[in-house]
């Protein structure tokens, strides 16, 4: 595969051990005046004008188009997949209505009616260290292990392809888009939905702890309007793609078919030094258009997957089989979920 342009924000992950990421040093915001606040998107100097901004957008769009062309025969339109086990008399939209993208976690999938619905917009929300990203990685690993294409749109530049959740997955089937702004992330998501070749698209809009100030949260939220979610929900409708957004607090509102909120319960640390070992959390079904809501599904997140006394599923998320684990320390070098 010809490599993407060197300045490209779009990349295809080859393997966990070969997945060294290009580190782009975040710029410090020149407008906020607050030391340590990282800029969410690149800014243009006044003399650059709209021409420079248009050139950057064009370059990012060109990089995405180049990679989609390279995927070539691996991408199929949704209606071309009807012959693969679907009745010929049904349209792609009707077939997608009854299909789901499972997580591999039996209890959770049962509550969701089979998993995250294909052809619909869903959302996983929760505070940092709630298990939201681990659940998304588990869903991604389960999807890749079925031999289909998936995409991860990464706004915070926090995606780790070397995660234990993905250790046994075929990362050649994963498209990793490193967006520089919320607008670029949304446009990339729309373009990928139009290809109808990805069974799962994860739009990671979670705010990392380093950008947890109220002003930054407000910027994230205002950059993605309700009309944006309406447009994405409409584009996902009838496709063969499950679109799942990750956020700190719910952003999609009534536009989502399903909203799952992750709530941490307790954590256990081992050491010295004190390191996170286990996180007890629960997934609460806050919204579903066709299933009862309010159900709580207990889950357990391990910092690593070397736990033979529990049933593991696609990495580090497990069903909670015992009573909640109580925290034994209040400080730790956190290397688990965000």
Image (spheres, rainbow, N blue to C red):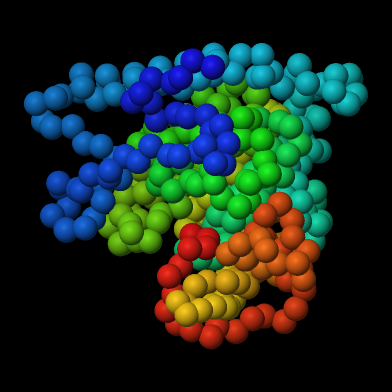
- Compare residues 272 and 254 and report the one nearer the observer: 272
At x 66%, y 35%, the residue is 170
Q: Is residue 182 above or below residue 206?
A: above
- Compare residues 165 and 38 and report the one nearer the observer: 165
Is residue 214 shown left or right of residue 99? left
Residue 120 on image: x %, y %:
66, 39
- Compare residues 101 and 149 and report the one nearer the observer: 149
- Compare residues 162 and 193 and report the one nearer the observer: 162
Q: Is residue 266 above or below residue 301?
A: below
Q: Quadrant of residue 47?
A: top left
At x 50%, y 38%, the residue is 19
At x 73%, y 71%, the residue is 320
Is residue 141 shown left or right of residue 128? right
Residue 182 on image: x %, y %:
38, 39
Can you name the residue that lies furthest to the left here? 47
Is residue 110 shown left or right of residue 170? right
Q: Which part of the image, by quadrant, shows the N terminus?
A: top right
Residue 319 on image: x %, y %:
74, 66
Residue 150 shows up from this direction: no
* Mark count: 0
Q: Is residue 120 above or below residue 133?
A: above
Residue 15 on image: x %, y %:
58, 36
At x 60%, y 44%, the residue is 244
Residue 141 shows up from this direction: yes
């Amino acid at each position: 595969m010809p490599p993407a342009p060197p300045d490209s924000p779009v990349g295809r992950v080859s393997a966990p051990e070969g997945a060294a990421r290009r580190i782009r040093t975040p710029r410090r915001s020149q407008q906020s005046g607050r030391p340590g606040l990282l800029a969410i998107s690149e800014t243009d100097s006044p003399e650059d004008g709209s021409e420079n901004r248009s050139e950057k957008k064009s370059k990012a769009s060109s990089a995405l188009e180049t990679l989609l062309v390279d995927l070539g025969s691996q991408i199929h339109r949704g209606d071309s997949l009807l012959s693969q086990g679907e009745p010929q008399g049904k349209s792609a939209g009707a077939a997608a209505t009854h299909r789901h993208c499972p997580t591999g976690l039996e209890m959770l999938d049962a509550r969701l009616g089979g998993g995250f619905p294909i052809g619909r917009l869903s959302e996983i929300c929760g505070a940092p260290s709630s298990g939201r990203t681990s659940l998304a990685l588990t869903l991604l690993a389960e999807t890749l292990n079925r031999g289909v294409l998936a995409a991860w749109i990464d706004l915070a530049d926090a995606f780790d392809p070397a995660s234990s959740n993905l250790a046994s997955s075929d990362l050649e089937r994963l498209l990793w888009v490193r967006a520089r702004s919320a607008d670029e992330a949304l446009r990339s998501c729309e373009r990928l939905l139009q290809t109808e070749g990805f069974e799962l698209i994860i739009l990671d809009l979670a705010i990392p702890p380093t950008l947890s100030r109220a002003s930054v949260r407000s910027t994230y939220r205002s950059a993605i309007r309700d009309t944006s979610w309406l447009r994405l929900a409409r584009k996902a409708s009838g496709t063969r793609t499950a679109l799942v957004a990750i956020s700190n607090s719910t952003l999609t509102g009534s536009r989502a078919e399903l909203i799952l909120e992750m709530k941490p319960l307790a954590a256990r640390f081992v050491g010295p030094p004190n390191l996170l070992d286990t996180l007890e959390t629960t997934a609460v079904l806050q919204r579903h258009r066709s299933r009862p809501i309010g159900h709580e599904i207990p889950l357990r997140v391990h910092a690593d997957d070397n736990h033979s006394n529990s049933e593991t599923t696609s990495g580090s998320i497990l069903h909670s089989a015992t009573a909640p684990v109580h925290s034994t320390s209040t400080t730790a070098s956190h290397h688990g979920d965000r």
